[in-house]
Image (spheres, rainbow, N blue to C red):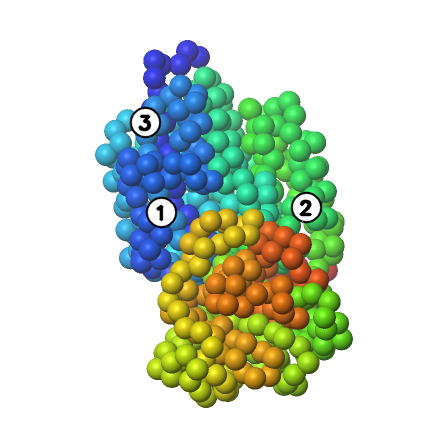
């Protein structure tokens, strides 16, 4: 088919990962705080960033088509998006597409795990909103995060779907380019389809790293199958704190007009994941045991105490002081750093001033379901309110605000960094900014499932995954799933 002179390809991006176990609902404010850009501004502000929208716009232009930016909305992981905010975002997409005028194709960048009030498959609702504006038969390609829960609504609404290939994620821009490349090929006559295979299993985020087995082996299997009519095989192990219908490990296969071959490939890769499901198990350590292990190895470099159960990048509130309590239990001998989100305690420190004495409860101010407050006494060492500039390989150079903050020297070897908003513990710059050098500590609290590996590089002796409850816990059996199909591996342990 001959391509028309200069086709117009729209690119829109509405992205948030929902944690349905998070305490606080997400709102439009979470998006506006990160920049909510419409039309040309979406392209201008995204240019040069490693994002799906920037990659897609660049690929469209490189392919000789006119790139038409529609909308860019992004928010950090959080709780279920309220109905008004979702309607507003869907309206921005709809109105943006109307304003864009006739398009020859659309690339729609979505997370794939967005849940709104009354819309458990909100990404699918966005695809339908776009379809309502596009002329019938207009090519529509979607991109998803690897943590997406692929739904029938998505698969049925798009011509093709591609997902990230990496975790920790570094290929956001490349994924946008892959989506746009498919849209360009559709203008030249390609008629693709995407099929999905799923298995009723959840994978802890800690064992989803793409460099580790079994994900590395599954990725190789997927790459080996990408040949002939099979254009793309994407793995979607899903972020596990998502209580929705259709929850499960997904594999999508995008094909050039051979749905039977695609279905067979998708089922084969999904089955390979299912067969290896036991290999995804993680073995978290009780906090007391982890602290004892640190004491046993004093002087041999920092041990990271990984409280991924309360990870702000996974939508949790980072307000648990359980590790602080454990580190205070037997004072002395080790130097340790911990951090807790606690606005009232920060206020108490600022009132006391540098060098002042504080005696305040800390913890459980935002999400009291998983932990209890701890009494913190000590001396205010430092106060601040300025944002941190990250230095590690994850998100290098980005500025992260943690609100007002204070460090409290407890006189026991433990110094606590109290913040109004979550400190970026996946990067040593978070503590360093507050005058606490992780390299000089025996133990450092980290609230992150895998991002710290990139942020810290090799800068730690050992990382111990903590066995704790929380909105982003690795112990999926601690969570109360009510909407997900059952039985579900591994939480229904006896069912397999
Ligand atoms: Zn992700």
Horizontal side, residue 187 vs residue 225: left or right: left
Horizontal side, residue 449 vs residue 318: left or right: right
**Labels 3 & 2 near each other (Cβ < 8 A):** no
* Residue receiving disc 1: 73
| Coordinates of residue 347 in the picture (x, y in percent) | 36, 78
* Residue receiving disc 2: 211
Report how far apart the C-alphas of labels 3 and 1 lie in the structure.
20 Å
Horizontal side, residue 320 vs residue 230: left or right: left
Q: What residue sits 41% from the left and 48% below the top?
A: 15
Ligand 1 neighbours mark 1 (CB distance < 8 Å): no
**Callout 2 environment at 10 Å: few (<14), some (14 to 19), or many (20+)?**
some
Label tally: 3
**Labels 1 & 2 near each other (Cβ < 8 A):** no
| Coordinates of residue 291 in the picture (x, y in percent) | 68, 76
Q: Which mark is residue 438?
A: none
Judged from this view, the residue extending furthest toward the top is 2
Residue 391 visible to the viewer: yes
Quadrant occupied by the N terminus:
top left
Judged from this view, the residue extending furthest toward the left is 99
Sequence-first disc among 3 and 2: 3
Image vertical order of residue 492 relative to residue 351, above or below: above
Quarter of the image for residue 389 reads bottom left
| Coordinates of residue 268 in the picture (x, y in percent) | 69, 39
Q: What residue sits 30% from the left and 44% below the top?
A: 37
* Residue receiving disc 3: 103
Q: 16 and 168: which one is in front?
A: 168
Q: What residue sits 43% from the left and 22% below the top?
A: 62
């Amino acid at each position: 088919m001959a391509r028309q002179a200069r086709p117009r390809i729209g690119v829109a991006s509405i992205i948030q990962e929902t944690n349905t176990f998070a305490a606080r609902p997400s709102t439009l404010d979470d998006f506006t705080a990160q920049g909510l850009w419409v039309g040309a501004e979406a392209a201008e502000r995204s240019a040069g960033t490693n994002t799906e929208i920037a990659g897609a716009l660049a690929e469209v232009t490189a392919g000789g088509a006119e790139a038409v930016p529609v909308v860019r909305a992004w928010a950090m992981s959080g709780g279920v998006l309220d109905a008004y905010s979702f309607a507003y975002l869907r309206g921005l997409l709809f109105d943006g597409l109307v304003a864009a005028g006739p398009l020859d194709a659309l690339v729609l960048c979505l997370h794939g795990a967005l849940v709104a009030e009354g819309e458990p498959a909100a990404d699918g609702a966005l695809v339908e909103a776009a379809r309502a504006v596009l002329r019938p038969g207009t090519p529509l390609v979607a991109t998803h995060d690897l943590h997406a829960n692929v739904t029938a609504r998505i698969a049925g609404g798009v011509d093709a779907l591609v997902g990230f290939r990496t975790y920790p994620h570094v290929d956001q821009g490349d994924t946008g380019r892959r989506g746009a490349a498919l849209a360009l090929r559709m203008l030249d006559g390609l008629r693709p389809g995407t099929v999905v295979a799923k298995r009723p299993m959840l994978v802890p985020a800690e064992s989803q790293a793409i460099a580790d087995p079994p994900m590395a082996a599954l990725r190789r299997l997927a790459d080996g199958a990408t040949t002939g009519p099979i254009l793309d095989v994407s793995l979607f192990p899903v972020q596990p704190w998502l209580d929705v219908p259709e929850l499960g490990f997904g594999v999508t296969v995008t094909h050039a007009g051979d749905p039977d071959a695609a279905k067979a490939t998708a089922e084969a890769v999904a089955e390979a994941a299912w067969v290896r499901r036991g290999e995804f198990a993680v073995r978290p350590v009780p906090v007391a045991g982890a602290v004892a292990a640190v004491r046993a190895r004093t002087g041999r470099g920092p041990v990271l105490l990984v409280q991924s159960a309360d990870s702000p990048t996974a939508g949790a509130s980072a307000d648990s002081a359980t590790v602080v309590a454990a580190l205070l239990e037997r004072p002395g001998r080790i130097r340790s750093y911990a951090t807790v989100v606690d606005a009232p305690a920060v206020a108490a420190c600022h009132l006391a001033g540098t060098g002042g004495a504080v005696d305040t409860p800390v913890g459980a101010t935002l999400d009291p379901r998983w932990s209890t407050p701890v009494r913190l006494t000590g001396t205010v060492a430092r106060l601040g309110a300025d944002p941190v500039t990250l230095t590690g390989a994850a998100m290098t150079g980005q500025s992260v605000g943690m609100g007002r903050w204070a460090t409290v020297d407890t006189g026991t070897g433990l110094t606590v960094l109290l913040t109004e908003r979550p400190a970026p513990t996946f990067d040593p710059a978070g503590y360093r900014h507050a005058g606490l050098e992780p390299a000089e500590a025996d133990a450092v609290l980290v609230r992150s499932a895998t991002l710290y590996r990139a942020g810290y590089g090799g800068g730690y002796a050992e990382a111990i995954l903590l066995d704790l409850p929380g909105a982003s816990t690795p112990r999926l059996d601690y969570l109360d799933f009510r909407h997900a199909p059952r039985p579900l591996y591994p939480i229904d342990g006896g069912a397999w």
